[in-house]
């Protein structure tokens, strides 16, 4: 089996199995107490994709929340991501698998092929698949919490029609193939400051408060409403989601699969960890059937 090798291990997240496990156990310990009742079952969510030191705890919370009750299994985890423009073409890993420090994850080739056939996404081999932190930083969490599951990894541009179509198509294909799936959309929130060419609210704490309480709050409202068209509009007009296509596809998939609500589990900014005039927002959302 041909494997897409890691490009960010040892830098954006730990590079060994032991270090990944220790980090994940630390995230679980730090966030596992007093968690809000989020309903059951959770069938998908939205995760950030910065280095684990900044947003790994939030991503871990979301993916852990997707683990079903004992006695139930998940066949495939679908991960939507990629930094793209509305005019870009989407893509999917068609075969092989992806590597992680915890061991490889095999691609669900039949589900990937069905998704590509229904949407026109380009089918890429592991050798041609791009290095995407939006996707790769989720793989160790998936390998840890879903050790027997396969994966479908896809890049989705911020185009409402395609994102909605991709989300619905992957659920319909999974149902035809008899797959139990979980769906994850990978996006960070507002990229604020001179480094990103976006600073409408000045600098310092006032800017952080605007990002948190206004710009990112509007994006989270669209996410928790499972409104894929509004997610795209928010991401493009307010620049509060860098991968709005991925988030929209995940929301559309979960709505198609029976989700009725979204819940924001956590929110943070890189400013919280390292104060700077240029910073990024991160949120974790789960989609629940109840």
Image (tube, rainbow, N blue to C red):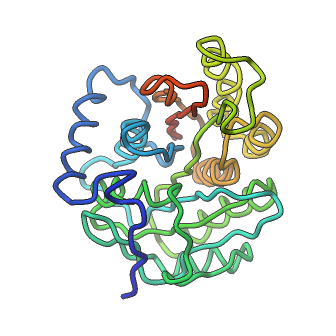
Residue 68 image point, x, y percent: 34, 49
Rendered residue at 41%/77% (across/down): 97
In which quadrant of the rendered view does residue 224 lie? top right
Rendered residue at 53%/55% (across/down): 134
Left or right of 4, for residue 45: right
Residue 180 image point, x, y percent: 44, 63
Left or right of 67, for residue 200: right
Residue 35 image point, x, y percent: 34, 24
In which quadrant of the rendered view does residue 74 lie? bottom left
Residue 57 image point, x, y percent: 36, 37
Left or right of 28, for residue 270: right
Residue extending farthest to the left is: 18
Placement of 283 over or under 90, stated as above or below: above
Rendered residue at 66%/45% (across/down): 242
Residue extending farthest to the bottom is: 1
Rendered residue at 36%/88% (across/down): 1
Left or right of 152, for residue 36: left
Placement of 109 over or under 33, stated as above or below: below
């Amino acid at each position: 089996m041909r494997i897409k090798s890691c490009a960010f291990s040892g830098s954006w997240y730990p590079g060994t199995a032991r270090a990944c496990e220790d980090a994940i156990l630390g995230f679980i310990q730090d966030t596992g107490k007093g968690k809000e009742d989020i309903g059951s079952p959770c069938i998908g969510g939205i995760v950030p994709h910065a280095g684990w030191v900044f947003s790994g705890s939030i991503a871990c919370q979301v993916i852990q929340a997707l683990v079903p009750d004992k006695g139930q299994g998940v066949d495939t985890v679908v991960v939507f991501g990629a930094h793209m423009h509305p005019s870009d073409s989407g893509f999917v890993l068609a075969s092989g698998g992806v590597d992680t420090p915890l061991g490889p994850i095999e691609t669900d080739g039949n589900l990937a092929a069905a998704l590509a056939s229904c949407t026109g996404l380009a089918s890429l081999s592991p050798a041609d698949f791009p290095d995407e932190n939006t996707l790769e930083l989720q793989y160790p969490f998936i390998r840890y919490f879903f050790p027997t599951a396969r994966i479908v990894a896809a890049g989705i541009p911020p185009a409402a029609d395609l994102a909605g179509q991709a989300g619905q198509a992957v659920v319909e294909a999974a149902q035809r193939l008899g797959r139990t799936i979980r769906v994850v959309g990978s996006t960070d929130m507002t990229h604020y400051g001179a480094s990103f060419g976006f600073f409408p609210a000045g600098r310092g704490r006032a800017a952080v408060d605007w990002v948190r309480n206004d710009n990112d709050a509007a994006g989270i409202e669209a996410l928790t409403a499972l409104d894929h068209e509004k997610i795209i509009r928010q991401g493009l007009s307010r620049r509060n989601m860098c991968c709005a296509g991925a988030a929209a596809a995940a929301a559309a998939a979960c709505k198609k699969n029976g989700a009725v609500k979204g819940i924001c589990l956590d929110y943070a900014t890189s400013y919280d960890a390292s104060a700077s005039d240029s910073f990024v927002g991160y949120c974790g959302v789960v989609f629940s059937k109840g």
